[in-house]
Structures are given as structure tokens and as C-alpha cells.
Image (spheres, helix red, strand yellow):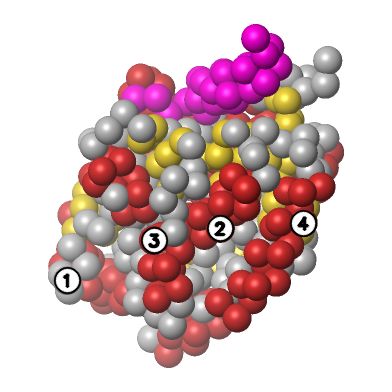
Amino acid sequence: MEPVRILQVVTMMNRGGLETMLMNYYRQMDRGKIQFDFMVHRLERGHYDDEIESLGGTIFRMPPIRPGNYRLYFKKLAEFFGTHSEYRVVHSHINENSSFVLRAAKQAGIPCRIAHSHLSDLRLDLKFPFRVYAKAVMKDNPTRYFACSKNAGRWLFGKGIEKTDDLIVMNNAINLQEFALDLSVREQVRDELQAGERLVIGHVGRFNEQKNHSFLIDIFHSVYRRNRNVLLVLVGAGHLEPAIRRKVEKLGLSGNVAFLGVRSDISRLMQGMDLFLFPSLYEGLPVVLVEAQAAGLRCIASSAITKEADLTGRVRFIGLQESSDHWALAVLDSSYEHADTSEQLRESGYDSAQTAEWLASFYHSAWRPILNPR
């Protein structure tokens, strides 16, 4: 019997939190029974594309979703679902734009249409009115409502859905074993970073507005003025990286900030960190914050992030209205010991093996009426 094929809809399969979470589940699925295919919205290849294809997945490329591109995009969606009747489950992860994908899937008669919210806010920008429009046309295009947190569910679907059993909060689970503390790995990473006895502050995230790197550098500068025996490790890439590099140089911090780019060994790098700093402007429930806790790190995060993200009692939330000096004092007042948090996270439902098993069961239950019609 052929495996059930699930269409996962994303922007691009790069090494972001959502994409890493999907790959965690994909790797642990019985691919003889469940197979993922991906609809992406970029022509260039993503970091995970090679692995997806090696696991038996197919990648379909759509044009980017842009306001001036709607007519072409809607036409392409209709053509796609008109020629791919093999999909009976579509799982869309593109937040408010899921409404367009799932509307086309509904028109094509696809019975299980999942909208999955991964954010809890959006910043005002030129696309904001179009995003409001996309949320407004969500309506009954989904048949299932998923979110990484209650806040994320409320933001995309409204209080009417959030307060009912229709909302399924699906944890952003990770491979807990991969993040278990290994002192020999910690020493290797710190040697590679030339950290010595310095306090190593870590951050993982794309260089975009959401991650608030400029304020992060302000915080680190305030830390540095009080303690020069520090190192900031930045993992990720993005369009704002050149501006952040210039700011680091202007503040005289170049010898104390390491830009590591996109990495595939996040769990290993976290072994070498002493503290995780995450002043995002908005998030859903960030996978990387779960990963940092799984690595046993103390975390300092913005209060714009849902308190549901503190799964271990090791996250301190600070308001973004507070000064960089206030944040710096919190960094310097923190303790830096690592802790084994694996059992806490497993009991909280953040073990990707358990969640992958639940998700496979969910997909099969969605297919069962089709596989076994009365």
C-alpha cells in the first residue's frame, strides 16, 4: 500500500524554527505510511531541500505571495489543486496567507484543510492591510485549526475559535536527546569560538526586524561596558546582517561578537553557551527557545513572547520598553549553570518523537474515511 501523502505548505525550507520542527517530525515518521511533500513559495532551493528529496518528498514551487501578484498566484493555486487530486490533507504553515491556499484546496474538494498559526502578532508595514485582508477571508476555509500556542491561535483565528475545542495547540517539539549536555562537546565548541573563560551569550535567529538584533546589540554593548570578558554568538543570516555588522564595528565590539551564519549544528553550539538572549518583537512559541531550554540554558526573552514558552522555569521575561541597561543587569545578575531539563520537557509534551506519533495518527484519522468508505 502506498503511503498517505500530506502536502505541507511553507514559505521556504530554510533552517528556521518552523522548518526545523517540521523536519524533526518528518524524520521520525514511518515514511512507509506517511510521506510529506512540500509547496514552497521561493524559486531558490532551501537548506533542507536535499534532505527532503532524499527522504522521498517532492517539492513544488509557487510564486511568492505578494499583493501585486495575487491574480497570478490564485491562478497557480487553482491549477495545482486541479492536477494534484492525490492530496486529501493540506497542512498550511504560512499564517494569514494560509487562507488563500486553503480556499483553493476547498474549491478543489480537499476534505482536510489545516491552518497552522506560528505567530502571535505582526508589525505595521506596507503589507499590513493585505495581511488584515488575508486574515479576514480565512472564514471556514480551514477544517482544522492548529497553533503553536493559545496566543498564536487567538491572533490568527480570533477568540471564537481560541475558546473552543476546535483549536489544537500543537507543541513545537524537538529532539530532546540531541540537546542533552555533553561536557566534551562544550569544551570543543568553546575552543572553536576562542571563548576561553569568557561569558558566552548566544542568540539564534534570522537577521530580520522580528528578531530585534539592533536592540540585542544595544544590550550586549551595555553588558560589555560593565564586563569586557564576554562574547556574543550570533547564529543565522538575513537581509539586516550587514547593518548589524556595521553597528557592531561602530561600537567597537568586533572582537567580542561572532557571526556564525546559518548552521546545521545548533544543538552542538548551544553546548558552548552560558546564556541565551532573545529580545524578539513578536513570536508564536519559538522553537529555538525550547531548544535553548533543552540545552539546559538560562534564557532572557522579551515579554512580547507568550509565557507558555517558559517550560522549565529557566526563562526570565523583560519588557521591550525597558532600557538596554536594565536588560544588561539582568544578564549579569543571572546564574549560568546548565541543568538537565529533558524530563520536564518530555512531560510537557515537547519530545518530537511523541508529537510525530500523535501527528501521524491525526493524519491517518483524517484519511480513514477516504481509505475505508462505508
Q: Which mark is residue 100?
A: 2
Q: Callout 2: few (<14), some (14-19), or many (20+) C-alpha neighbours within 10 Å? A: many
Q: Earlier in the sequence, mark 3 or mark 4?
A: 4
Q: Earlier in the sequence, mark 4 or mark 1?
A: 4
Is 188 placed above or below 203 here? above
User: According to the image, label 3 marks what residue?
Assistant: 136
The quarter of the picture where residue 371 lies is top right
Q: Amino acid at mark 4?
A: Glu
Which residue is drawn at the image coordinates 77% and 39% (left, top)? Answer: 85
Which residue is nearer to you in this view: 195 or 151? Answer: 151
Q: Earlier in the sequence, mark 1 or mark 3?
A: 3
Q: Is residue 196 magenta?
A: no
- Residue 350: give x, y in percent of width and height: 43, 29
Real-space Cα distance between discs 2 and 3? 11 Å
Which one is in front in this view, the residue at disc 2 or the one at disc 1? 2
- What span is in magenta? 348-374
Is 252 placed above or below 175 here? below
User: According to the image, label 1 marks what residue?
Assistant: 321
Real-space Cα distance between discs 4 and 1? 48 Å
Q: Amino acid at mark 3?
A: Ala
Which residue is nearer to you in this view: 79 or 175? Answer: 79
Which residue is drawn at the image coordinates 34% and 25% (left, top)? Answer: 348
